[in-house]
Amino acid sequence: MWLIFATIGGAMLFYATEWVPIELTSLGALVALILISTLLPQTGLSAEQLLIGFANPALITILALLVIGQGLIQTEALAGLSEKLVRLWPDNPMRVVILALIIAGAASAIVNNTPVVIVFIPLLASLLAKRNLPASKFMMPLSFMTILGGMTTVLGSSTNLLAAGIAQQNGIESVSFFSFAIPGLIMAIIGGIYVLFIAPRIMPDNAGDTIVKQNRNRQFITEIRLSYGHPLIGEHTVGGMFPKLTNLTVRAVQRGKERFLPPFDDITLKSGDILIIAATREALTQALRDWHAFEDTGSINTQEREKGVMLCEALVPPSSRLIGYGVDQSGFMAQHNVLILGMERRSRMPRQLMSEIRLEAGDVLLIAGQPSAFEKMRGLQDLIVIEWSASEVKPRGHALRALIIFFLTVATIASGISATVVPAIIGAFFMIASGCLNIRQAARSIDRRIIMLVGSSIAMASAMQSTGGAEFVANGVIASLGTSSPAIIMSGLFLLVAIFTSFLSNNATAVLFTPIAIAAANSLNVDPLPLIVAVILGANASFASPIGYQTNLLVMSAGHYNFRDFFIVGIPLVIIVWIVFSLFAPYYYGV
């Protein structure tokens, strides 16, 4: 038992300090547990028992839900809803984000918080992307708000239902739908103030977001040729701008030999006009997807149109033979079957047609084509394809498919007609089979840190329970509090459960401590309900680590978080809800 304690303590130390990667710490803890079980067979542990965490339904559920969420992001299925939210306060994006988080927290009171987080991750990601806000500032608050909301009713989380069920098995029928609604609501309100207004200020601005933001702000020069039937023909200026091009900066309109410069006064676009535009990659992608801005994409969408278009950036190296020549669209299309959408040059922003701009070393071209075309471009000496910049533009037709799959999955999970893992796996399968995702995108959505973290944490929990360590600590603390008042016992039990739920799952903690709480109440000759509530709310206070609750694991990848980030932001929240519970709950229950 003490060897297990030492292993878990060492793992927590390495997780918190991140001296080595999370994956290596998880694997090292697993190896230590396997060695202990092999050298000391009296522990009752086996390698099979320790490794079974990697086949745990909770882990499989999380991975499947990540795939489903990626399908929504790739198809931008929730873009319409996010755009409606953004339009509420166009000049104050923080209000929109706070409103979305409050809605998520309120919904978690009546719907299990896991499907709520599944819904809001892609929605929040879309909101943040449109307003250039870092995901790392708000994804963890999303998980925390749903956990706080889930503290108010029995339906709020699986932990609540599980603890109520165990209490019923022990003859305690007093845990009803609203048994802890008032103390839970007080904790949710005060904790929510911290989550909404303080946590984002101490949340890390992770490197993953910085890269995205830099790429999003990069401006490409491009041109749009208005051939017959183009959707921009007939567009008229309003206040010197084109309403349909508010996300793009029109630098010039070329009409024959005449060139119009901004501000544009009383111009109606005609067939044959050429628009010279500066825009971010995100804006160009949006124009390509929404209204087929670039007519030449038809030639790269012949047999594989349903699979969408891939965008990639390519660097002109100093030794390139393209230097000094203009952009030859027809030549590129004939030779490589790709279209040049734009060119980025850090030194200046020209107002010329792309064919008139002479390429220089260091220029970056934004090119569009099929994945097979980019495969053939690898190894070119004249143009270096930057593979990490590749992204795929799915036709909007896939959004409806993704939404149908998503809502059927969430509805099945929320109904409880089957174990969560079943609809999650089926939903992930149909996301890929229907073309909303390809295998590469699905594989990229799975975070290896989560796999190792969950697998090793389940192994540590199994080892602690098998060797009697969990029961030893729980009984020892309860015994030390035995002579105290019921109010002190409630407070101590809440804090103990909140600590345990940081490295055991909250469900496992509820299963362990609910019978202990009932036994303690019987020995004190008091109503067991207040102590059971202390266990339920303490098990929900899983803010200090990603292990505690699966919503934390879901946002860990979306927000690019490390284990330490949950320590820094979550521990103050645990302390806040513990203090609120200790001051209010004993008074409310009259103990």
Image (cartoon, rainbow, N blue to C red):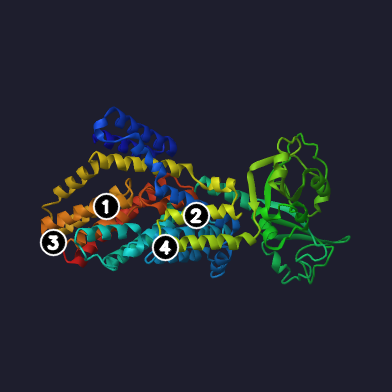
- Label 3 neighbourhood size at 10 Å, few (<14), some (14-19), many (20+)? some
- Residue 170 falls in image quadrant: bottom left
Q: Is residue 448 above or below residue 266?
A: above
State the mark number for residue 526: 3
Q: Mark 3 belongs to which amino acid?
A: Val
- Residue 267 falls in image quadrant: bottom right
The image quadrant where one finds the N terminus is top left
Mark whose residue sits in front, 2 or 4: 2
Badge 1 or badge 4: first in the primary sequence: 4
- Label 4 neighbourhood size at 10 Å, few (<14), some (14-19), many (20+)? some
Badge 2 or badge 4: first in the primary sequence: 4
Badge 4 or badge 3: first in the primary sequence: 4
State the mark number for residue 414: 4
Q: Mark 4 belongs to which amino acid?
A: Ala
State the mark number for residue 426: 2
Q: Mark 1 belongs to which amino acid?
A: Val
